[in-house]
Amino acid sequence: MRIGELAEASGVSTRSLRYYEEHGLIRSTRTPGGWRDFDGSMVERVVMIQHLFAAGLRSATIAELLPCLDAPPAERTGVMERLLAQEIARLQAKRRDIDRELDTLRALREETALSGEVGTGAAAQPAR
Amino acid sequence: MRIGELAEASGVSTRSLRYYEEHGLIRSTRTPGGWRDFDGSMVERVVMIQHLFAAGLRSATIAELLPCLDAPPAERTGVMERLLAQEIARLQAKRRDIDRELDTLRALREETALSGEVGTGAAAQPAR
DNA sequence: GTGGAACCTCACACCGGTGTCAACTGCAAG
DNA sequence: CTTGCAGTTGACACCGGTGTGAGGTTCCAC
């Protein structure tokens, strides 16, 4: 499939797809005329890449991580596992930040609503 | 207190403090010679601003939000409440995103660990 | 009154993913 | 063969918080 199709199928701009390729996140063959030709499996991968970007990973990290998807299990290295663990930890930290700020904002809101009531440590965790 | 002290006390660079002031996040008086003079209460505020940044708020949003901290409750407007509610909603959404990304990464990790097991929708939510 | 640290303003650079424009070429339908 | 859309590369801009440096001024301790 060509870049326009992939863009439409994955919901990512052609600009971004070229960027992904340039940075080794996706691969393509070329037609004799130089047009990119993508494998259908790239749709799924591009979507995942988007998720990883959304999670705050940078392209270099994703590039290191992606071999997990391609390589036969035997070749998966401890490096990748460490990378994964690291990213997971990062996200967990971020999650805690957000929780803390949610607490702050909720306290602020209660304060506003109650006109002066000082919410010391409000904000229980409602089910997600 | 002057900018260097505030920087040290809050752990934020003087550059950033000037930026915060420029964008209305903190205020200062000036000495006759033009040096910034910060109130001691700014330390706490700067720390909070940092947290809000960490949670992904942008300076403009923080600037709109901060009056909640200053204004006596009586003067708090519905606008602020709406803003608060909006940011809370945004953070909650972000939190859900992060949870989803954590799922993705955890699934990837399991896959790696299990050598080829295809994790379709893995990753239960372990207590935070 | 003087040295030097701390401050001032202004300006430019960076990161990294994406938008956008320019100038050019491939491909397929008429 | 022509037309025109879709593709190609390359370059520049943007966002927003921060680093950095130049060139000048203020403050304070000696």
Image (tube, coloured by chain):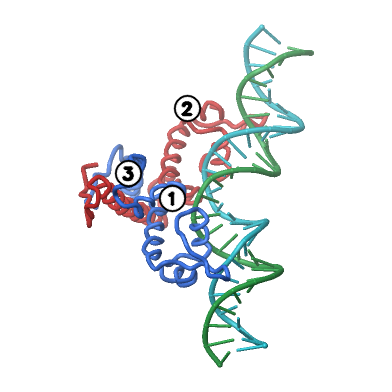
Chain colours: A red, B blue, C cyan, D green
Q: Toward which corner of the image does residue D12 lie, by quadrant?
A: top right
Q: Is residue A23 visible?
A: yes
Residue A75 x/y as whole percent:
42, 51
Task: Give how far apart the Cα atoms at labels 1 and 3 are.
Answer: 16 Å
Instruction: Return the residue at label 2.
Output: A9
- Left or right of A62? Residue B123 is left
Amino acid tagged 1: Ala
Amino acid tagged 2: Ala
Q: Which one is closest to the eye, mark 1 or mark 3?
A: 1
Q: Residues within 10 Å of mark 3 (few under 14, many from 20)?
A: many
The disc placed on residue A88 is none
Q: Label 2's element?
A: helix
Amino acid tagged 3: Ile
- Answer whether labels 1 and 2 touch (C-beta < 8 Å): no
Instruction: Return the residue at label 1.
Output: B63
In-front residue for pair C28/B56: B56
Instruction: Return the residue at label 3.
Output: B88
Same chain, labels 1 and 2: no
Q: Residues within 10 Å of mark 1 (few under 14, many from 20)?
A: some
The numbered mark 2 sits on a residue in which chain?
A
The residue at the point 46 percent across, 31 percent down is A10
- Answer whether labels 3 and 2 touch (C-beta < 8 Å): no
The numbered mark 3 sits on a residue in which chain?
B
The numbered mark 1 sits on a residue in which chain?
B
- Left or right of B47? Residue A6 is right
Q: Indicate the quadrant containing the N terminus of chain B: top left, top right, bottom left or bottom right.
A: bottom left
Q: Is residue A81 visible?
A: no
Task: Give how far apart the Cα atoms at labels 3 and 2 are.
Answer: 32 Å
